[in-house]
Image (cartoon, rainbow, N blue to C red):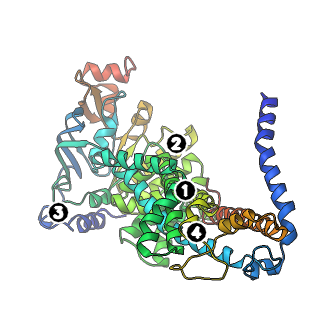
Amino acid sequence: MDVTTVAADAGATISGSPGLEPALGGKQAGGVLRVENLSAFYDRRRAVREVTLDFRPNLITAIIGPSGSGKSTLLRCMNRMHEVVPRGRVEGLVEYRGIDIYDPRVDPAAVRRSIGMVFQQPNPFPTKSIAENVVAAARFNGLVKGRGPERELVERCLVQAALWDEVKDKLDDSGTSLSGGQQQRLCIARALALAPDVLLMDEPCSALDPVATSQVEQLMTDLRASYTIVIVTHNMQQASRISDRTAFLNMGEDRAGYLVEEGPTPEIFTQPRLQLTEDYISGRFG
Amino acid sequence: MNVLAVVAFAVALVPLAAIAWYVVTKGIGVINVDFFTQDPPGDLSAAGGGIRNAIVGTLEMTGFAALIAVPVGLLIAVFDVEVGGRPAVVIRFVIDVLAALPSIVVGIFVYSLVVVAQGHFSGLAGSIALAIIMLPPVVVATEEMLRLLPRSIAEGARALGLSRWRSFLSIFLPTAFSGIFTGVLLAVSRAIGETAPLLFTSLGNNFFSLDMSEPMQGLPLLIYRNALNSAFPAAEARAFGAALTLVAMVLLFNLAGRWMVARSRPSGSR
């Protein structure tokens, strides 16, 4: 899918809120997605402290760090999923194509349509068939209408998610009848159906076996050309295998996660600037 | 351990089998086409006639009660789970108290509230009493199902740009549907056999009537009245025949419900 049409689509969905179109005009020289001084809270407890990061288009950025370093929370702030948690609160700026996604005029649902998310546990809708899993959200959001276009969308997304050949003869079976790895690719297909241009992946392989993991990793590499991908991972080998850039988060003394350093993945893994990163990469803690 | 399990199984099964056997052997004798297509004779001691009015009355009153109790119960459960907070705790407490209320008290309550106000007994009053009986199990079953479901399912829907209520109605609720439906079936099965709440509400009668504003006969009432007159062989036989009909109705009802649930899901789902 070509990036300009996706951007236009994204603009169309977000610009449902008035006054945001001008900001959409030019594609920014920098990233598609940018967070600045971002802090996230659960009630009064701070989980992420003042993170500033730039996510560039058509690259895979990995967020690594020990448990409790706020990786998932940071990720969930970037498509307004953090506020779905009771008493979840965000401070700071998250900018998507020049739009402050926390602007009160912005509809969080529109943000989530443009910035898709895949979770740690595959979570296909249990009462829906494979085809329905892919198409349901797109239909609710009014992105597709009629049997023909729906069928096409299902096929296109399943092909893109490298699942079509395995399920094309049983599209009416339940989504939960698939194996774990297939379910995860179904969830990726489901996210793709909304034509997002950013994909946030929260440890998408941690519940999968090695074969399924390598399939999903291959898929991410294939999707890189058309999407901006951010992946949270516990697995440093995975980060070094598939990502172009790596951000390392650590848990501070106040138990909130903070950004230690960010850079091209080979650099982070071979010659990090900071000793702390070196220690984490070499497995001395975490 | 295995021996204990077998013993426990037997202890649980014996009363069930004994009741089923007793009702079937005593009741099967009067079952014929007339039994379902005719109304009872004015004089209970007379032989012949059927229980058509009671079957229809039970279906109508229980069905109407379900129409009241199911939506209200669903709303209460959804409120408790999705909104929560102090009001939910209070509501849940009230529901628990309601569940513990003897059914005859429910009958008296509806009598003083509806029958006295209306000036006469009616099928509607019976339905309201049955609805109050049904409400707690519907609420409890729905709440349990909704709490049991992994939040990740609702979360996945939210992440796809669905609003909170859209994701709840279109994704979360259908996922819980089979469990909720089972709860509703249990509630209906319980209410359908209730006698006490109907005694001072729908009262019962001996002729066929579909009018909810008039007194209405129900199977439990018919069984009760005929059993009271069991010195007459015809009344006793009619009571057992009606009891067998009631048990069979509940059984069929549950089987049909389960079949519907199984059929409504895509194949291979758990």
Give the total number of marks visible in the rendering.
4
The residue tagged 4 is B62
Label 4, label 1: how many angstroms apart (C-alpha)? 17 Å
Is residue B250 or residue A9 the one in the foreground? B250
Is residue A157 or residue B122 the one in the foreground? B122
Disc with the residue nearer the chain's start (4 vs 1): 4
Q: Callout 2, which amino acid? A: Ser
Q: Callout 3, which amino acid? A: Leu
Q: Nearer the viewer, mark 2 or mark 3?
A: 3
Label 1, label 2: how many angstroms apart (C-alpha)? 65 Å
The circle drawn on residue A214 is: 2
Is residue A107 or residue A273 the one in the foreground? A107
The residue tagged 3 is A24
The residue tagged 1 is B104
Quarter in which the N terminus of chain B is drawn: top right
Q: Callout 1, which amino acid? A: Ile
